[in-house]
Image: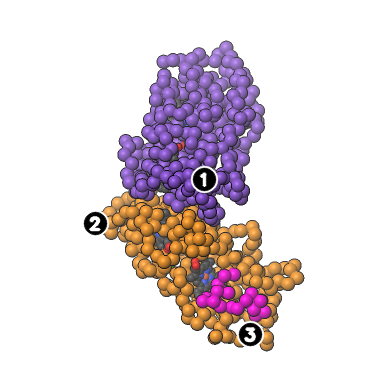
Chain colours: A orange, B purple
């Protein structure tokens, strides 16, 4: 029985864990040094509805920081409640991904952040110029950009919006007991979780879900058994045959909290997601029992939310020239 | 036809190449800083027959530096022509492996080097003490150890043998056209090689063969279709179930020159090795045509041997107390 099995002591070879990495305190990038001022500005912008056309959508609408960085919906409603075509991935630990978006089309968080603001089904701002105009009309933002980008003559730029949000996101990390376990504490996981980890390693899930984010590289969905989907992943972006069905491997950190699953948000429960992975990536059926063990391990990857870091800040008041919400 | 296909222009998405890394000039490890003196000593020890019981086997016997670091045999003859049970892997680029040996039982090159000298079927020295006694009896080595480990009161130690050989090996790297290609030079690979790379990426070989050595982590042999072998890989070492059939992924650099293939040296040609990989790791049959394309790509991974670095050095003369060869 699973219960009996779970009480077995699973002995894990620590050498197999070298493919993982404990979470850093932040994902640094020398191209965008993290400063307190940049983070403070980035946090405001992350929660800022006025970065959307109708002043009703912010990053946090789709990536709710109190809900592990997701909204729990297959597709997220943006401007005029329009739905995009892909599931919103979590922003937590996304700094550990090699590339951003399901198709890897942004090289880093800073570039990524510049996408949704102008995306007509997300925040739907008409232009970079309008974003800058809006921010310049809010005195509190002008000051905040000056502090975040000292020495710049004209610091309120669209590019700096990306840098500030990126700096904020680079510290959205959720250390968990698994990190304690990785750093040598055998008691950080219980026996049932270790048994699950053993099954995970035996299946070979770590061939793709590895590194500090336990995911984040580009891999083929349907390596062995094709996955039916109109969405052809990175191929739709590049039209290169070698990119067909290539998707950015999602992080498995907090995966128990980020349903529904897959780029199409088509799977509600983690058991099913794990079984589908084994089928499509290995052409194998995993037993219900082993699936449960793996899910028990995945549950242990739920980390701590940085409560005070993610508290919604006070946003500066609009000025007389701040554009009004535009529901059109 | 393959010829026609090879003249097609394969367009590779460079984002997929982020799993590889160009070869560094040396694989540094802060625990064993590389100095010219250590390297000089390490090179002598690498070619030193007197580190074997009968003065007839050196590292270079099994890992011939002029032959891409292998001897071309399924199993290598050691002391009294005894054969070990596993194929000799190449020493080139081994510094890029996460762990050493087919079962990953040594954490680095320095520890690895201390194994074969005492292994009864390899160099068969009876004890560490005998190795140290031999080296101390050779005046040229005493001087060389003093220079390599300055400030040590008693530098001729078994551990320092490992450090010196390790430092030498950390610069056994073979940059190839693939590295030029990785660093952005589109002309470094020809169209046929790029087509092969595309097939390699489409199959998903890079899920395991990646990083600077294009290999080097621990993975399961027979992920989808079991590989029949008495040798159970890392399981035989640890007796942990999660280690069954786990082997250290071999580097694919110079793989065209390191036949025969697999830990059991059972496969003579690269075509067959590639087909078996697809069968055992993905449960797929690759067409002859695609196999040839992949092999064409693998051929491009053959790098340049560092001719002067690997030239056999003059070895210091034995002293009066140097033990005599022992054929027993
Ligand atoms: C209306 C919903 C919505 C809004 C608003 C939104 N996002 Fe997203 N976000 C998504 C979706 C959907 C994706 C995946 C799109 C894709 O991959 O094609 C995504 C992807 C991302 C990613 C990539 C994560 C990964 O793992 O690849 C990050 C980071 C991110 N968003 C941050 C932000 C930030 C910062 C903002 C605000 C500036 C924002 N999002 C606004 C829905 C939204
Ligand atoms: C060869 C690569 C590969 C292997 C092996 C693999 N995965 Fe995945 N995994 C992916 C990719 C790519 C996706 C994203 C698929 C998508 O949604 O488009 C994914 C998605 C997932 C998801 C959904 C996550 C989310 O937030 O939507 C889970 C859960 C998961 N994998 C678990 C596993 C488990 C457990 C195993 C082993 C049984 C495994 N994977 C093996 C590449 C792999
Ligand atoms: C008689 C043959 C023989 C001799 C002599 C020998 N080796 Fe090896 N070497 C092997 C075999 C066989 C293996 C693989 C053994 C295993 O994995 O269990 C190996 C493994 C290695 C590896 C690991 C490479 C990898 O990819 O894992 C290195 C490095 C290495 N040898 C260096 C040396 C050095 C340095 C010496 C001399 C001090 C030496 N060898 C002497 C046969 C030999
Ligand atoms: C899931 C991991 C994995 C995947 C995927 C994989 N390999 Fe391997 N490969 C290994 C392991 C492990 C070995 C060592 C097996 C042994 O000899 O014990 C190996 C060995 C090899 C060898 C023999 C090298 C030598 O020096 O003996 C070649 C060649 C090779 N792989 C090529 C490929 C190609 C081409 C593909 C894609 C079609 C591929 N591999 C996919 C893990 C993998
Ligand atoms: Ca999700
Ligand atoms: Ca070989």
Chain hosting mark 2: A
Q: CA distance from mark 2 to mark 3?
A: 63 Å
On residue A1, which mark appears? 2
Q: Are marks 2 and 3 on the same chain?
A: yes
On residue A323, which mark appears? 3
Chain hosting mark 1: B
The answer to whether residue A275 is left or right of residue B300 is left
- Where residue B81 sits, quadrant-wise, is top left
The answer to whether residue B43 is left or right of residue A242 is right
On residue B86, which mark appears? none
- Where residue B163 sits, quadrant-wise, is top right
Query: Mark 1 = which residue?
Result: B192
Alpha-carbon neighbours of circle 2 within 10 Å: few (<14), some, or many (≥20)? few
Seen at 59% across and 24% down, the residue is B312
User: Foreground: A222 or B37?
Assistant: A222
Do labels 1 and 2 touch, CB within 8 Å?
no
Q: Is residue B108 above or below residue B67?
A: below
């Amino acid at each position: 029985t699973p219960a009996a099995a779970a009480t077995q002591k699973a002995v894990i070879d620590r050498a197999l864990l070298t493919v993982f990495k404990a979470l850093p305190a932040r994902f640094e990038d020398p191209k965008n040094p993290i400063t307190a001022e940049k983070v403070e500005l980035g946090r405001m912008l992350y929660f800022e509805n006025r970065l959307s056309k109708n002043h009703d959508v912010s990053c946090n609408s789709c990536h709710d920081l109190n809900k592990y960085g997701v909204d729990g919906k297959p597709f997220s409603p943006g401007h005029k409640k329009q739905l995009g075509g892909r599931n919103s991935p979590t922003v937590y630990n996304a700094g550990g991904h090699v590339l951003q978006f399901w198709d890897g089309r942004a090289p880093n968080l800073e570039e990524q952040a510049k996408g949704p603001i102008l995306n007509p089904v997300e925040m739907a701002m008409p232009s970079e110029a309008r974003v800058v105009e809006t921010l310049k009309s809010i005195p509190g933002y002008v000051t905040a950009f000056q502090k975040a980008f000292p020495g710049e003559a004209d610091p309120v730029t669209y590019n700096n919006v990306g840098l500030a949000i990126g700096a904020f996101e680079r510290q959205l990390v959720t250390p968990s007991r698994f990190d304690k376990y990785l750093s040598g504490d055998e008691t950080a996981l219980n026996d049932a979780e270790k048994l699950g980890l053993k099954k995970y390693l035996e299946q070979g899930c770590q061939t793709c879900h590895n590194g500090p984010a336990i995911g984040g590289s580009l891999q083929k969905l349907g390596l062995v058994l094709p996955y039916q989907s109109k969405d052809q992943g990175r191929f739709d972006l590049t039209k290169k045959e070698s990119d067909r069905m290539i998707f950015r491997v999602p992080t498995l950190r907090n995966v128990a909290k980020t349903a529904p699953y897959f780029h199409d948000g088509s799977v509600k429960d983690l058991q099913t997601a794990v079984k589908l992975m084994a089928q499509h990536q290995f052409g194998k059926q995993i037993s219900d029992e082993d699936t449960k063990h793996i899910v028990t391990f995945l549950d242990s990857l739920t980390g701590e939310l940085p409560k005070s870091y993610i508290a919604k800040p006070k946003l500066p008041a609009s000025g007389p020239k701040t554009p009004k919400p535009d529901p059109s």
